[in-house]
Amino acid sequence: MSPSEPLPLGATIGILGGGQLGRMSAMAAARLGYRCHIFAPEADSPAMQVSAANTIAAYEDVGALHRFAASVDVVTFEFENVPAATLAALEGKVPCRPGTRALSICQDRFAEKRFLVEAGVPVAPWRAVETMADLLAAITQIGLPAVLKTTRLGYDGRGQAVLRQPQDAAPAFERLAPKPLILEAFVPFTAEISAIAARGMDGAVAVFDAVENRHRHHILDLSFAPARLPAMAAAAARDHVARVASALGLIGVMALEMFLLPDGSLLGNEMAPRPHNSGHWTMDACACGQFEQHVRAVAGLPLGPVARHADAVMRNLVGPEGLAAWPALVARPDVVAHWYGKAEAKPGRKLGHANRLLALGSLSGLDDGAACGGI
Ligand code: AMP
């Protein structure tokens, strides 16, 4: 098979990672006539439950990786903390989409910030912090409040601390690991926005409407689609993610998280080179949602339509509270409910999500309570 041709029906997509993003990608792949083979260290993961083949092995197990490469037609990943060495061990044996470059940029906050700025997306002032002396110098330059973060393996707000007064610096520096850290100016945002782009093998880019995100305990709680933003800011958010996807040479989908400032401008915060929690609304409010776009891109198919046919509010179902909400949500006529098949409802664990669909164009006239309608 030539690398520029679409994968034939019945071909196998290898996915590194077994979580819900892999599960929903595998379900979208099945709809397009592809099989999935999941590679993950955990048995009975959400993605393995819905896939044709599984390998349960460590990401460092080179023998297992080589057997996996021989059994699939293309490889993708569903979370960005897959070791870059794992993807590097597969590249050259099988096409990897996205490749190691996109992965390694998104794994390192320094590389990510530099890349965003080069791609034309402004970011908050930041400094690299290796030692306590660096941190004190960075505080002098950036001022307080500021946010101190790990540069690698950050996830759902873990690995960060807000510094409000000088005495906060030393305990935060001691606690956060691994070093180096990054100090960012605290952004007085009025909303958190994200946008998702898909980029195909042919370089075509398609962008979903930008959404507004609300977090609870550092975990995404709600996404409002579309974001209730001035048209200029909404267009800028979409332009930003499209430029970044092109600059990365991405094949697949990516999310760009941004802060909206009081003057209507945007600052880039973080990006993820994979389907994203803030894009789950697209599964039910667009003809071709983010998971199908991802599979299309990785398989070399043309991208699908990204237009919204409904407005939507997505709620994450997290921990025991999420489990308790499920029976009522799955019974509602205005909600499409999704469950990930995780074994335990541990606090803080994402177990599913609910998409409440509203008439196209109606969200802008609603406050949050009315938009959520009790979901
Ligand atoms: P992150 O891990 O970078 O996505 O940060 C998690 C959350 O912390 C964000 O969604 C924001 O709510 C908050 N946050 C992160 N960086 C900043 C910042 N520089 N200023 C203000 N809030 C921030």
Image: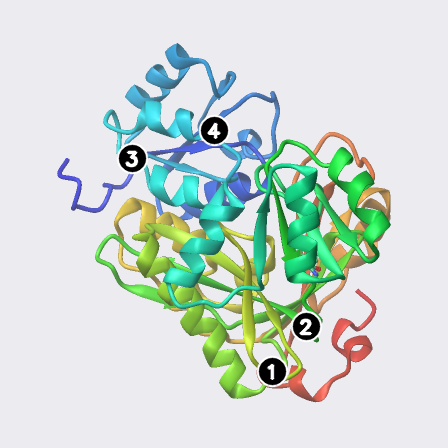
* Disc 2 target residue: 191
Density class for disc 1 (Cα within 10 Å; few <14, some 14-19, many ≥20) is some
Establish whether ligand 1 lies closer than 8 Å to the Cβ of label 2: no
| Distance from Cα at disc 2 to Cα at disc 3 | 42 Å
Question: Counting residues from the N terminus, which is met first, the one under dot 4 or under dot 1?
Answer: 4
Q: Which circle marks residue 229 in the picture? A: 1
Q: Which circle marks residue 11 in the picture? A: 3
Q: Tell me which residue sits at (65%, 37%) in the image.
A: 131
Determine whether, in the image, residue 327 is placed left or right of residue 130.
right
Q: Nearer the viewer, residue 14 or 329?
A: 14
Q: Quadrant of residue 287?
A: bottom left
Density class for disc 2 (Cα within 10 Å; few <14, some 14-19, many ≥20) is some
Cβ atoms at labels 1 and 2 below 8 Å apart: yes
Q: Type of residue at label 4?
A: Pro
Q: Type of residue at label 2?
A: Ala
Q: Tell me which residue sits at (70%, 75%) in the image.
A: 190
Question: Counting residues from the N terminus, which is met first, the one under dot 3 or under dot 4?
Answer: 3
Q: Tell me which residue sits at (45%, 47%) in the image.
A: 111
- SS state under label 2: strand
Establish whether ligand 1 lies closer than 8 Å to the Cβ of label 4: no
Q: Evaluate whether residue 156 shows in this view.
A: no
Give ligand 1's quarter of the image: bottom right
Residue 241 x %, y %: 43, 65
| Distance from Cα at disc 4 to Cα at disc 2 | 32 Å
Q: Type of residue at label 1?
A: Leu
Residue sticking out furthest to the left: 2
Question: Counting residues from the N terminus, which is met first, the one under dot 2 or under dot 3?
Answer: 3
Q: Which circle marks residue 83 in the picture? A: 4
Q: Nearer the viewer, mark 3 or mark 4?
A: 4
